[in-house]
């Protein structure tokens, strides 16, 4: 089997203190955690970091590992001393089996043969997926607080999550859990809105206009997330045309805009009088709506 150089795996000296070891482990665990890392072979590297930390964090295991000798290099063929199992309980004999953790699955043959698995300490997960947090668009605009129920080591626990103003759909919200517990990562979900569509920090509003407002121009009161504003409609506006209200989207260092999309709504011709008006328009305008149709 191949010898594992745990010091090389973590990039530390053999004289590294327990504090240095823990600090380096946490940094590498965050870097390679499969749920968040974009590094190549992240899961494999994450397991290697965990394995090295499992041995070196324990003074007894570290002392025994150091007895194997610093002359070996990672990847070299290695045979444990003949009396290793009798002296130290390695080879799966249980001398160090003080509990088990799912995180240890997949450790190397070297670890299994020399130390038999298992640790008595919960591994520090750098970030834990805590699921989705759903907010309304108004809450995303102004910020809000959510009380979330979590299961903490088998016990129900409530935490208050502060959601800052200007969060966007799919944004990851990192909440410190305290102590050695993993940070919680919530993903923001914005509920569909009856009036607005959302894309990033921009919001879009469909604005109904009467034909004469679009043709002649008008000043229309338009709702925004921060309150109503007056919008000037230019003469000759067409359905599908977009007008921009800068800075009226979701807040932020670079705030989003509100896009107002024009929708021309024709009055119904439900009476003889109404039909007569449309017939007069048909004759006098001499307008072909499909003249420029591709």
Image: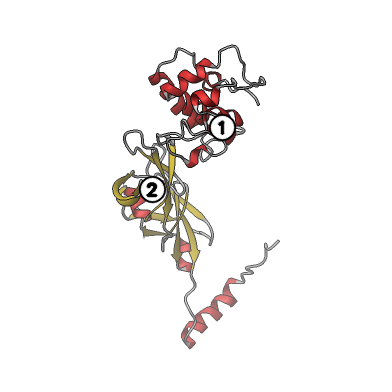
In percent of width and height, residue 257 lies at 43, 47
Residue 216 percent location from the top left of the image: 46, 62
Q: List x then y, in percent, for residue 91.
A: 56, 30
* Picture quadrant of residue 253: top left
Quadrant showing the C terminus? bottom right
Q: Nearer the viewer, residue 274 or 118?
A: 118
Helix, strand or loop status at disc 1: helix
Q: Position of residue 75 (x, y in %)?
A: 65, 21
Q: Secondary structure at mark 2?
A: loop
Residue occupying image coordinates x 50% and y 54%: 242
Q: Residue furthest bottom?
A: 272
Q: Is residue 289 left or right of residue 116?
A: right
Instruction: Please name the residue shown 48% across and 26% down the image.
Output: 55
From the viewer's perspective, is residue 286 above or below residue 242?
below
Which badge, 1 or 2, comes first in the chain's sequence? Answer: 1
The residue under label 1 is: 112
Residue ID at (47%, 75%): 267
Q: Is residue 289 left or right of residue 153?
A: right
Label 1 CA crowd tier, 10 Å (few <14, some 14–19, many 20+): some
Q: Are marks 1 and 2 in contact (CB under 8 Å)?
A: no
Task: Name the front one of labels 1 and 2.
Answer: 1
Task: Determine if residue 245 is in view.
Answer: no
- 62 is higher (above) or lower (below) than 226: above
Q: Nearer the viewer, residue 280 or 260?
A: 260
| Res. 222 image quadrant | bottom left
Observer-nearest residue: 83 or 69?
A: 83
Q: Which residue is mark 2?
A: 248
């Amino acid at each position: 089997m191949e010898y594992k150089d745990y010091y090389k795996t973590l990039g530390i000296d053999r004289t590294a203190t327990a504090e240095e070891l823990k600090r380096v482990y946490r940094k590498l665990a965050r870097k390679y955690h499969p749920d968040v890392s974009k590094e190549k072979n992240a899961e494999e590297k994450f397991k290697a970091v965990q394995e090295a930390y499992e041995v070196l964090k324990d003074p007894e295991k570290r002392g025994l590992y150091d007895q194997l000798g610093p002359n070996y290099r990672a990847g070299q063929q290695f045979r444990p001393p003949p009396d290793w199992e009798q002296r130290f309980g390695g080879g799966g004999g249980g001398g160090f089996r003080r509990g088990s953790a799912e995180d240890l699955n997949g450790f190397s043959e070297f670890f299994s043969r020399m130390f038999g698995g298992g640790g008595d300490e919960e591994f520090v997960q750098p970030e834990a997926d805590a699921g989705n947090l759903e907010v309304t668009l108004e809450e995303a605009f102004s910020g809000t607080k959510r009380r979330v129920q979590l299961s903490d080591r088998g016990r129900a626990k409530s935490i208050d999550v502060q959601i800052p103003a200007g969060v966007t759909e799919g944004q990851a919200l990192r909440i410190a859990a305290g102590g050695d517990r993993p940070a919680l990562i919530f993903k923001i979900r914005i509920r569909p809105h009856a009036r607005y569509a959302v894309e990033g920090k921009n919001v879009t509003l469909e604005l109904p206009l009467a034909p004469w407002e679009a043709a002649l121009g008008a000043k229309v009161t338009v709702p925004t997330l921060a309150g109503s504003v007056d919008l000037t409609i230019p003469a000759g506006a067409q359905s599908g045309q977009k007008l921009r209200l800068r800075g009226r989207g979701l807040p932020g260092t670079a705030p989003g805009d509100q896009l107002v999309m024009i929708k021309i709504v024709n009055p119904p011709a439900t009476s003889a009088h109404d039909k007569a008006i449309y017939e007069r328009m048909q004759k006098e305008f001499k307008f072909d709506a499909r003249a420029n149709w591709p």
